[in-house]
Image (spheres, helix red, strand yellow):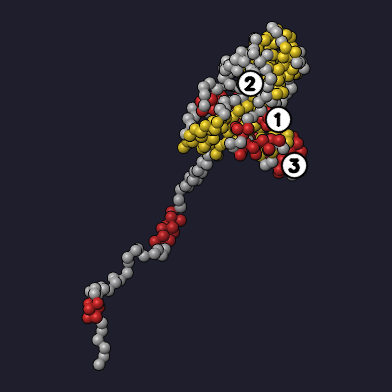
C-alpha cells in the first residue's frame, strides 16, 4: 500500500515518526516498560530519546533522563547509538555504552532499569492487531461501541471469502452493494491519503456490516464501521487537553476541523472526551459525535442523522375526486362542540331552607 502522507508537526507526547526521511526497514520495539508492545518504525535522521517533550521519542520512565540518548539512522539502514551521559546509564546487550556504538538488528538497548527496546526488522502490522495492542485502555474503555468494533474486526473475513460463503445469488448481490456504499462513505469521511483506491486492500466483512481495516505509513491504523471508528495516528495535534483531541479529529476526518465541542470531560491520564452536537448533520451523516482520545489514539462513536423524508409532490387533482372528497367531509359526522345541547335547569337557591321551599308538597 503506497500512500504518501504529509509530514506531521513536532511531537508533543507519545510515539511519533522521526524527522523526515526515507524508511529503512527497521523498527524499535518496547520489550519492557509502560509502552511494552509498542513499536516505532525508523526513518533516516536523528531520533532523540528522553523525557523531554521536544524529543522525537519521548519516554517517561524512571531512570530515563531529560536528554538520554540519540539514535542516528542513515539512509542505508545503519543505526548508531550515541550516549549523552545519562545518570541511569545506557546499555546494549547488557554492556554499558560510552560515546557511540553501532547497532544491528537483534540488539537490545536498555535505558536505566525500566525500559528495554529491541532493534528488529520492521514487520507489517495488521491494523486489527495494532489497534488491539497499542491503543491505551483508558481510551477504548470509554466507548462500548469500540470494544464491539475490535471484536468484529478480529472475527471479520475478507470480502472475497464472504462472497464465496454466500451461496445465494441474492445474498452475494446484497454484500457487494453494501460494500460499494460503505467504500464510498469511507472515502467521503476519512482524509483521501488514508484510503487506497482498491477497496479489496482494506475492506472486510463482519456480518451483517462491512468493516474497513486501513494501514498507512507513519504508524497510522484505522478501524472504521458505519458509526464507529478507532484510530492510531502520528502525533499531529498541537496543544493540550481537548485541543489535542480536536486536532487529531480534524486531521483524520474531512470537514471536522470546524467542529466545536459542546461538552468536554477530563478522564485523567491525558485522556479527554469531547461531545459534538449540531442541528444539521455533521460530516454528512452524524447528528452527534463523542470522541475520546489523547491526541494519538482516537475512538469515535456517532449517532446517525435522521433526515425526514420529503412528502411526494401532489399531482393535479381530479375535479370529480375533489368534489367527492368535499361532499364526504361535509356529510361526515363530527362530535358536537363542547357545551352544545339544551341548557341545564337552574339550581335552587343554596341553603337548607331554600331547598325545602322548592320541595314538592306531599299530596294530602
Closer to the chain start, of discs 1 and 2, is 2
Drawn side of residue 329 relative to residue 91, left or right: left
Q: Which mark is residue 166?
A: 3
Closer to the chain start, of discs 1 and 3, is 1
Q: Is residue 284 visible?
A: no
Distance, label 1 to label 3, CA atoms, is 27 Å
Mark nearer the viewer, 2 or 3: 2
Distance, label 1 to label 2, CA atoms, is 28 Å
- Secondary element under disc 2, as helix, strand or loop, is loop
Q: Which mark is residue 62?
A: 2
- Residue positioned most to the front: 87
Distance, label 2 to label 3, CA atoms, is 55 Å
Q: Nearer the viewer, residue 332 or 201?
A: 201
Coordinates of residue 234 in the picture (x, y in percent): 61, 22
Q: At 71% across and 35% down in the image, what residue appears?
A: 154
Drawn side of residue 324 relative to residue 16, left or right: left
The residue tagged 1 is 129
Which quarter shows the C terminus?
A: bottom left
Coordinates of residue 13 in the picture (x, y in percent): 58, 21
- Secondary element under disc 1, as helix, strand or loop, is helix
Amino acid at each position: 500500500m503506497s500512500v504518501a502522507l504529509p509530514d506531521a508537526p513536532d511531537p508533543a507526547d507519545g510515539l511519533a515518526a522521526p524527522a523526515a526521511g526515507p524508511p529503512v526497514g527497521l523498527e524499535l520495539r518496547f520489550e519492557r516498560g509502560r509502552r511494552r508492545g509498542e513499536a516505532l518504525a525508523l526513518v533516516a535522521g536523528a531520533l532523540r530519546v528522553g523525557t523531554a517533550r521536544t524529543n522525537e521519542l519521548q519516554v517517561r520512565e524512571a531512570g530515563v533522563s531529560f536528554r538520554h540518548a540519540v539514535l542516528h539512522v542513515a539512509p542505508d539502514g545503519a543505526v548508531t547509538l550515541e550516549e549523552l551521559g545519562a545518570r541511569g546509564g545506557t546499555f546494549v546487550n547488557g554492556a554499558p555504552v560510552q560515546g557511540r556504538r553501532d547497532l544491528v538488528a537483534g540488539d537490545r538497548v536498555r535505558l536505566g532499569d525500566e525500559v528495554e527496546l529491541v532493534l528488529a526488522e520492521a514487520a507489517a502490522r495488521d491494523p486489527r492487531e495494532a489497534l488491539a495492542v497499542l491503543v491505551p485502555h483508558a481510551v477504548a474503555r470509554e466507548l462500548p461501541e469500540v470494544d464491539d468494533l475490535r471484536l468484529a474486526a478480529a472475527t471479520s473475513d475478507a470480502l472475497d471469502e464472504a462472497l464465496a460463503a454466500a451461496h445465494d445469488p441474492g445474498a452475494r448481490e446484497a454484500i457487494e452493494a453494501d460494500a460499494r456504499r460503505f467504500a464510498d462513505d469511507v472515502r467521503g469521511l476519512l482524509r483521501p491519503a488514508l484510503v487506497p483506491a482498491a477497496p479489496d486492500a482494506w475492506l472486510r466483512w463482519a456480518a451483517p456490516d462491512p468493516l474497513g481495516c486501513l494501514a498507512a505509513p507513519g504508524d497510522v491504523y484505522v478501524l472504521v464501521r458505519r458509526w464507529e471508528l478507532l484510530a492510531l495516528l502520528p502525533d499531529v495535534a498541537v496543544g493540550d487537553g481537548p485541543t489535542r483531541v480536536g486536532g487529531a479529529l480534524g486531521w483524520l476526518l474531512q470537514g471536522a476541523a470546524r467542529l466545536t465541542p459542546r461538552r468536554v470531560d477530563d478522564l485523567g491520564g491525558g485522556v479527554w472526551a469531547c461531545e459534538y452536537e449540531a442541528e444539521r448533520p455533521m460530516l454528512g451523516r452524524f447528528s452527534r459525535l463523542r470522541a475520546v482520545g489523547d491526541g494519538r489514539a482516537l475512538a469515535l462513536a456517532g449517532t446517525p442523522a435522521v433526515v425526514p423524508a420529503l412528502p411526494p409532490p401532489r399531482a393535479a387533482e381530479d375535479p370529480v375526486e375533489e368534489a367527492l372528497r368535499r361532499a364526504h367531509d361535509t356529510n361526515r359526522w363530527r362530535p358536537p362542540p363542547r357545551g352544545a345541547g339544551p341548557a341545564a335547569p337552574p339550581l335552587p337557591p343554596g341553603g337548607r331552607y331554600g331547598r325545602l321551599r322548592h320541595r314538592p308538597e306531599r299530596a294530602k
